[in-house]
Amino acid sequence: MNKGVFIAFLLIFSGSFLQSQDCDYLKRSYEQIRDNDKSDIEKLEQISNVLNSTLDIQSCTSELASLYRIKGFCELRLNQSEFAEFSYRTSLKFAIKSSDTNSIGLAYNNLGKIHIRQNTTDSAVYYFHKAHKMFSKIDDDFGLMLTYQNLSVVYYYLDSLSWARQNAYRLLEKASILNDQEGLATGQQILNLVELEVDGIGDSTFYYYRKSLSVFKKINDHESVMNIYENIGSSYESTETYDSAIYYYKKASVIADSLNSAHLLSYMNAKVTDIGALLQEKNKNKLLLINILVGLFAILIVAVIVIIHIRRKNIIIKDNRIQELLSTQEIRTFESMIQGQDNERKRIADELHDRIGAMLSTIKLYHSQIDSSIKTLDDKTNSQHEKAGSLIDETVQELRRISHDLHSGILVKFGLKAALEQLADALSTLNKPKFNWYFNNVDRRFNSELEINLYRVIQEAISNIIKHADANSVNIQLNLIDEDLLVTIEDDGRGFDKRMKRGDGIGMESMNSRVEKMNGNFNIDTSLGHGTTLIIEIPAHD
């Protein structure tokens, strides 16, 4: 199935509806608009009439949030993305005024879908995570299901297949709790698309196709059933299993005929004819091959394959052992390097501050004790004495500055982004995990205390991932949005049960404590076998 078509389908049919006028009347009008069978254009005209009425509706914030949400939904289906974005932002404004957490979450979800259409995926991920935060506050399983669906789609669109798979599993978990058949079918479809991208055609491909097929049949979604039959036929065709391909293309053509789709029916029949010809050719070649091959040659081939397989298996086992040893040594080397740099800077800074600083303080003390006697000397000597005192004071201040710089390193000189880029260079030498860094609008300098604390939090998170997660890849995003710094750290490792104490619990508490000191929020989303996501939001104003 085409990625663009699949994503458009999910975006259009995952919306929600709501309201109009004098609060109660506004609510009844919304329900009428939501439930009638009129076209989107007619519904927009009804909404416009309600909003332009003479009733005082500005205090009905909850109802207005819902009404603007259905307005954005209709505009989105008519491909009026700019109008839809305005309606969704207006819905968010009224939802915030009414303190309706559910409506706020839905508004963030809808804004994320708008940004997918605008191809601004960083903002889309940001809004989906904001929606996730809202729905998590009220344990809204349906809202969380929608959010996981959207995240799985956007990550699939970005070819971040491990993240797409994780969110698809979370979508299936919530859909199972709610017994939501469309959610189950969508989750199975996403998993199937991911498996096709990662592993190509295999047994798991047909397993997920059949699970999706079962759900779509239950809800009588004939067009989706036809599309799955076509995809199964295409999969069998790509593996040259032509008899099975013909069978499923014929089943798809029957449904196309029932849907009165002449174009699709013609396409399916043409596929059946073409594959039938390929099947005849394949059978002829197969008979020819059987006549040529002899038993002894077949046995020889099998023996060679077995020998090659055994040798390759032994080589793989040996390589894996070597790689494991190298990876362990790289991790230890990296940790030692970082710790050694910090310790050396601190040692030099302490030496400067404690020893040389003490000596300068002693010189200053002796110098001040001769102030009274120096006044009896001539003006030139007295002037030189004052200059010497000033020079001692300047030396002390410069010493303190150098000591502070050594404690903070590159952070003080060049800022947070430069320090993180240096850290990224150091991490690039590791074979596993692979670190992917994304910076957006963070070239400016921030408050020095914020930069130091945030750098330590990110450093601690990376250390925990290397030690405990057994991850293959890590995505680290740093975005400045509306004067808020948003840090997202995602790994595809083993995850953990938040209810259980972990060995690195002190590290988590330390990170949380640092974030709280910066008036920020620290959130963890994880479960066993599905990786871990850290989301940190910190006010960036000075």
Image (tube, rainbow, N blue to C red):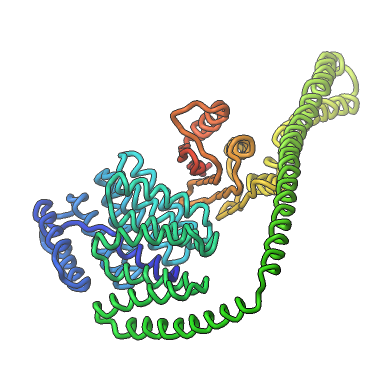
- Residue occupying the point 87% across, 18% down: 374
Which of the pair 449/392 is nearer the observer?
449
Task: Tell me the quarter of the picture where residue 218 sits.
Answer: bottom left
Q: Position of residue 26 (x, y in %)?
A: 13, 56
Does residue 526 appear left or right of residue 402 in this picture?
left
In the displayed structure, 502 sits above or below 41; it is above
Residue in view at x 46 percent, y 81 percent? 275
Q: Is residue 272 visible from the viewing direction of this image?
A: yes
Image quarter of residue 327: top right
On the picture, is 23 further left or further right than 248? Answer: left
Residue in front for this viewpoint, 471 or 390: 471
User: In this view of the protein, which residue sits in the foreground, 257 or 466?
Assistant: 257
Give left or right: position of 468 versus 65: right
Q: Is residue 56 visible?
A: no
Tell me where residue 106 appears, x and y as whole percent: 31, 52
Q: In this image, 76 relative to 4: left or right?
A: left
Q: Position of residue 118 (x, y in %)?
A: 44, 67
Residue drawn at (57%, 78%), measured in percent from left and top? 286
Q: Is residue 375 above or below residue 88?
A: above
Q: Quadrant of the N terminus?
A: bottom left
Q: Could you tell me how many numbered marks the image carries?
A: 0
